[in-house]
Amino acid sequence: MINELQRLLRVPNPIISLRDVEVDFDGYKALNNINIDFPFKGVQFVIGPNGAGKTTILDAICGRVKTSKGKIIYKGASEIQNRNPEDIVHFGVSRKFQNPTIFNTQTVFENMKLALLIGKSNLWYLFNSKITKEQQDTIESTLLKLNLLDVKNKVSGALSHGQKQWLEIAMSIINKPELLLVDEPIAGMSPSERDKTGELLTQIGADHTVFVVEHDMKFVSRFSSSVVVMHEGRIIDRGTFDKIVNNERVIEIYLGRQN
Amino acid sequence: MKQKIIYAILIIAIILPVLLLSDFRLSILSKFLVFSIVAISVNLLWGYTGILSLGHGAYFALGGYAMAMYLKLQSQPLPDFMEWSGIETLPWFWKPFQYVPFALVMVVVLPVALALLVGIPLFKSGTKGVYFTIISQAITLIMSILFIGQQGFTGGSNGITGFKGVLGYALGDPTLTKILYGLVVIVLIGIYFISKFMLNTHGGTIIQAIRDRETRLRFLGYKTHTFKVITLATSAAICGIAGALFVPIVGIISPSIMSVLMSTEFVIWVAIGGRATLLGPIVGALTINYAKTIFSESLPEYWWYFYGFLFITATLIIPKGIVGSLLKKKWFKNVLLK
Ligand SMILES: Nc1ncnc2c1ncn2[C@@H]1O[C@H](COP(=O)(O)OP(=O)(O)OP(=O)(O)O)[C@@H](O)[C@H]1O
Ligand SMILES: [Mg+2]
């Protein structure tokens, strides 16, 4: 059983591998010996009860929390554990936070501009106030993908909750990251916004690796191809939704909580 | 058309004081315009980047001392206060200050060096908010203690004064007063337009984004601490230039400028004038300092009560400051922004 799980957690040529990763919050191990690989491309869902360590695993990858043990290896070559978030981004890792984290006083377009400009290697842009036609097109095509083109001149603080979430996703993908980390994207969304988000993530997963933490089982069952289950800082299963809902441990964890 | 009218009014507003004010009053106006430059530098950091410094007196003083050292050496080969402290030869670090170009370069280099010394370790280690503010306060305090203690090199608590003249004119010469007024106006306008331009660039957008949500910017990949260090250094440079202009106008620089109270006043000018507005710091510095002059000429003992009252009511009634509140009015916007 254990060996079977170990086999499931490995993939050939992973984009990112976690090896014996541990995150310690003053003695409490929010992540305990995590070992997992992610393939290039595709959407990987993560589920688990409250406090399982789902957000922490994203935080460890993108540099928001320090790991106390283990390695995070990017494309089999670079160790990225415990680097600064701003450096990890430049490897191609992008993070979408649980609550909309955007520049509320700026317009949608300005938000996108801020996200896009960091991709430039030449620092002269800092003294410039214009963007090129090409950059304008990149922003507009990304906004179109996320249904935000109509509101591009709106102050982003005035958007609906769902639109704010999409804007942050748009900002996260504009520089074409290879790995996108998304934490509970559909919390607080209407059913139609949920559908749209699910389709979007699937679409993004065609070109990028997307790692989505989600609570909503209906959503996971509809849009997942592969699901990882976490509990108390450990990974306990990986597989299709149908497979993991028939795992007794998983049933026990979820039912146990409801009793 | 409207632009032209605004510029015409501006030019008249600049020339009128020269014709109408006594030399004494004109000199006071110049001093307040220097304070406007200080307020612009504080606003750049606090208003636009969200970093509150209560230690800008230190940068002002460094610019001021660099200028004062030059002016002093023009007056005496060996400053009088050195003789009083038993120093008989000019210390090595004083010597190059007899040359104008060196002194002028130091007006900017010294404050920028201090800003880098403070900014790099603090911002790199992620020091934020009130912690940075308290440390900035401590630094100006340490600087003032250092300057008071090193009497032989700095003139101690009396500071550096007793300049013979500037540009060949005696201090207080009416022509010099007018020249200095003109110089301050030119520098103020220059700094105003440079900061206006800079704030409109992508770099300007980025520093304002630091103020609004630094985390997002870091997770987009920006090294935000570098931007903060650069902004602090720019702000320090502007403040140092103001300090250098202050010295020939007032005729003295002393460690009292490095008091925490003085640095706090800089911030109050910005708060009352309008944080994160271009004109706010100028309006704030002029309004408060004129109010202070009027008060201290008639009711000096009540000024500080009035000041406290003004600050509290102003922050309650017009939290966005004078200019910030006016910008919400349509007519004001129409007048100013076409
Ligand atoms: N900064 C922190 N300091 C101390 N403990 C923390 C910190 N962040 C998270 N934890 C703890 O670590 C554990 C895992 O937290 P995490 O946020 O990863 O859970 P989660 O799986 O995302 O849960 P949820 O479904 O509620 O979002 C929890 O017990 C939490 O209380
Ligand atoms: Mg979470």
Image (cartoon, coloured by chain):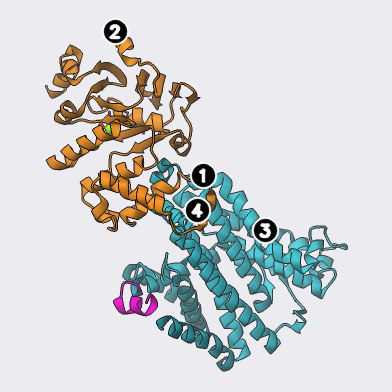
Chain colours: A orange, B cyan
Quick one: SS at disc 4?
Answer: helix
Number of residues whose C-alpha sits closer than 10 Å to that of mark 2, classed few (under 14), some (14–19) or many (20 or more): few
Residue on which the image places disc 1? A121
Closer-to-camera residue (B292/B109): B109
**Distance between the alpha carbons at the discs numbered 4 and 3:** 28 Å
Residue on which the image places disc 4? A125
Residue at image x 14%, y 29%?
A218
Residue on which the image places disc 3? B110
Highlighted range, magenta: B327-338
Give x and y (percent) for residue A246: 15, 14
Amino acid type of disc 3?
Answer: Leu
Comparing labels 2 and 3, the label whose residue is closer to the camera? 2
Residue on which the image places disc 2? A4
Chain at tag 4: A
**Distance between the alpha carbons at the discs numbered 3 and 1:** 31 Å
**Distance between the alpha carbons at the discs numbered 2 and 3:** 66 Å
Circles 3 and 1 on the same chain: no
Locate residue A109 relative to residue B48 in the image: left or right: left
Residue at image x 52%, y 59%?
B54
Comparing labels 4 and 3, the label whose residue is closer to the camera? 4
For the residue with label 2, is its CB less than 8 Å from the closest atom of ligand 1? no
Amino acid type of disc 2?
Answer: Glu
Number of residues whose C-alpha sits closer than 10 Å to that of mark 4, classed few (under 14), some (14–19) or many (20 or more): some
Q: Are the residues tagged 4 and 1 within 8 Å (C-beta)?
A: no
**Distance between the alpha carbons at the discs numbered 2 and 1:** 45 Å
For the residue with label 4, is its CB less than 8 Å from the closest atom of ligand 1? no
